[in-house]
């Protein structure tokens, strides 16, 4: 008899608890939202957070590390999902024997990343190649929904980039300090 009475009390307690428990996952339970200090937020929460990352290279090399493939795959996937964004590929190089060699290595690194993204189906018209003065064994990538020329001129003005290069509808553009923008038709090569 004691056992039967315990089961009835337990069943009644479980039924009362079940009626008060929120339905569904915790994050959809009806409760007042917490006040957040928006000045600490990384974004306004309304816009897309564009990818930015870095790819590192061995000293003096323009060969991609095998670990870069995953990052490039993710970046290409993100760009396909966000067609109005462009990607800036900012080449850096550690200091070489002379300034021209340093610039050349930075360009080769950035162009290698651009080529790999193109191989993954990203149009060259969406990729802006920047060559940085900053000495580093890396290529930094970041996405922006700004027009390519605005990204290029901002990089030239604020970060002191050496060269900005992009294509648009069969024309290659290059922006350099003291030179301005030059245009060159893209010549298709057949293999």
Image: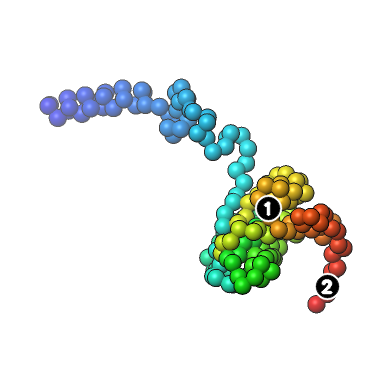
Number of marks: 2
Binning the other alpha carbons within 10 Å of mark 1 as few (below 14), some (14 to 19) or many (20 upward) gives some
Cα separation, mark 1 vs mark 2, equals 33 Å
Q: Name the residue located 69 percent from the left edge and 62 percent from the top edge.
A: 114
Residue 4 spot, x, y in % from top left: 17, 28
Residue 20 spot, x, y in % from top left: 36, 23
Q: Name the residue located 61 percent from the left edge and 58 percent from the top edge.
A: 134
Q: How is the image coloured?
A: rainbow
Binning the other alpha carbons within 10 Å of mark 2 as few (below 14), some (14 to 19) or many (20 upward) gives few
Residue at image mark 2: 189
Q: Name the residue located 56 percent from the left edge and 61 percent from the top edge.
A: 136
Whether residue 89 sits left or right of residue 40 in the image: it is right
Whether residue 25 sits left or right of residue 11 in the image: it is right
Q: Name the residue located 86 percent from the left edge and 68 percent from the top edge.
A: 187
Furthest toward the left, the residue is 2
Q: Is residue 58 above or below residue 54?
A: below
For the residue pair 29 and 15, the one nearer the viewer reads as 29
Residue 167 seen in render? no
Residue 9 in which image quadrant: top left
Residue 129 in which image quadrant: bottom right
Quadrant where the N terminus sits is top left
For the residue pair 92 and 141, the one nearer the viewer reads as 92
For the residue pair 74 and 164, the one nearer the viewer reads as 164
Tell us which disc is closer to us: 1 or 2: 1
Circle on res. 11: none
Residue at image mark 1: 160
Furthest toward the right, the residue is 185
Q: Element type at marker 1?
A: loop
Q: Is residue 78 above or below residue 3?
A: below
Q: Is residue 32 above or below residue 64?
A: above
Residue 137 in which image quadrant: bottom right
């Amino acid at each position: 008899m004691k056992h039967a009475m315990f089961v009835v009390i337990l069943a009644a307690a479980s039924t009362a608890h079940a009626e008060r428990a929120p339905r569904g996952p915790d994050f959809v339970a009806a409760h007042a939202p917490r006040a957040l200090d928006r000045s600490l937020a990384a974004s306004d929460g309304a816009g897309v957070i564009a990818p930015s990352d870095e790819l590192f290279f061995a000293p003096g090399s323009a060969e991609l590390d095998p670990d870069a493939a995953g990052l490039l795959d993710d970046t290409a996937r993100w760009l396909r999902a966000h067609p109005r964004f462009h990607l800036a590929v900012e080449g850096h190089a550690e200091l070489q024997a002379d300034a021209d060699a340093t610039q050349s290595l930075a360009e080769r690194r950035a162009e290698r990343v651009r080529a790999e993204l193109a191989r993954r189906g990203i149009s060259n018209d969406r990729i802006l190649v920047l060559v940085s003065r900053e000495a580093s064994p890396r290529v930094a990538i970041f996405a922006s929904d700004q027009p390519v020329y605005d990204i290029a001129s901002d990089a030239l003005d604020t970060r002191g980039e050496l060269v900005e290069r992009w294509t648009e509808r069969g024309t290659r553009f290059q922006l350099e300090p003291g030179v301005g923008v030059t245009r060159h038709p893209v010549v298709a090569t057949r293999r």
